[in-house]
Amino acid sequence: AEVVILPTSAEAGDLAASAIASLVSRRPDAVLGLATGSTPLSTWRALAARGLDLSRVRGFALDEYVGLPAGHPESYRAVITREVVEPLGLTPSLVRVPYDDGPLATAGERYEAAIDAAGGVDLQILGIGTTGHIGFNEPGSSFASLTRVKTLTEQTRADNARFFESLDQVPMHCVTQGLGTILRARHLVLLAFGERKAEAVAGAVEGPVTASLPGSAIQLHPHVTVIVDEAAASRLR
Ligand code: F6R
């Protein structure tokens, strides 16, 4: 992987935004893989500031919670609408999340088919969890896994409790792109900020390739850009 260490998340977001901007200038209907959570916010902010026409861009979210009431503001459908689709001027019908209408049992297959029909993901934005997860592929996930239902670890539920009123409101389950799905994207851009991510970043970039640290799957991919701040880079050798 190419590893870029920058002083601030704003500069990191600007670099990720320039990768997206150059892709979209070549391919106005590019397919973006979208992460939620705090990490990509500086990327969306920097991209919005460029004022590009992104109306033909297609988007596939990495994951979606299972079990939230319809329209819940912390569902990733709602988060992606609020933080990505609206500020960037994407076309709502061109952006999908892995669990929406339709039966849960076939959500994974339908999502994989939709990604295939779009021609695959051109550029996948990734964050990384303190457990080393990418998407919601928690430790033990198969490198060949495709979009499916997963159980969130207690650590990840606690990490995400900040978005909810209390820990017990954080869903237990999700539908997430698999590691195999993520590895099929043509370019992976993994962002991470802060000391809390340092260990996961070191494991993903330099550690053994192991299912105990799902982010280490990026080492199997030929085109990866890792963009981190100094704190998140602090355990790299
Ligand atoms: C979000 C996702 C997760 C997050 C990770 C980091 O769609 O798939 O892997 O990227 O949990 O979350 P933040 O950025 O909130 O620290």
Image: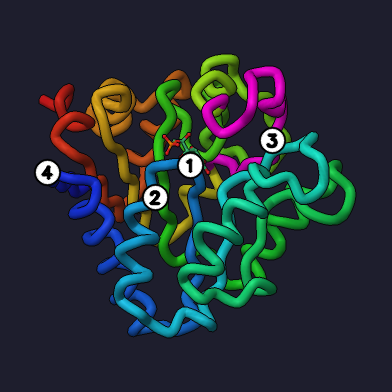
Query: Residue at point 63% right, 63% down?
Result: 115
Q: Is residue 146 visible?
A: no
Q: Amino acid at mark 2?
A: Pro
Write the start and end of the magenta stretch as one range.
Answer: 161-179
Disc 1 packing (10 Å; few <14; some 14–19; many ≥20): some
Queried on whether the Cβ of the residue with tag 1 lies below 8 angstroms from ligand 1, the answer reads yes
Q: Secondary structure at mark 2?
A: loop
Quadrant assignment for the C terminus: top left
CB under 8 Å between callouts 4 and 3?
A: no
Q: Is residue 46 visible?
A: yes
Give the mark nearest the N terminus, 4 or 3: 4
Q: Up-down: is 220 above or below 118?
A: above
Where is mark 1, residue-wise?
Answer: 37
Query: Residue at point 82% right, 40% down?
Result: 69
In this picture, residue 59 sits left or right of residue 185: right
Observer-nearest residue: 151 or 171?
Answer: 171
| Distance CA(mark 3)–CA(mark 2) | 19 Å
CB under 8 Å between callouts 2 and 1?
A: yes
Q: Position of residue 56 (x, y in %)?
A: 53, 82
Queried on whether the Cβ of the residue with tag 2 lies below 8 angstroms from ligand 1, the answer reads yes
Q: Amino acid at mark 3?
A: Cys
Where is mark 4, residue-wise?
Answer: 7
Q: Position of residue 220 (x, y in %)?
A: 36, 41
Where is mark 3, residue-wise?
Answer: 174
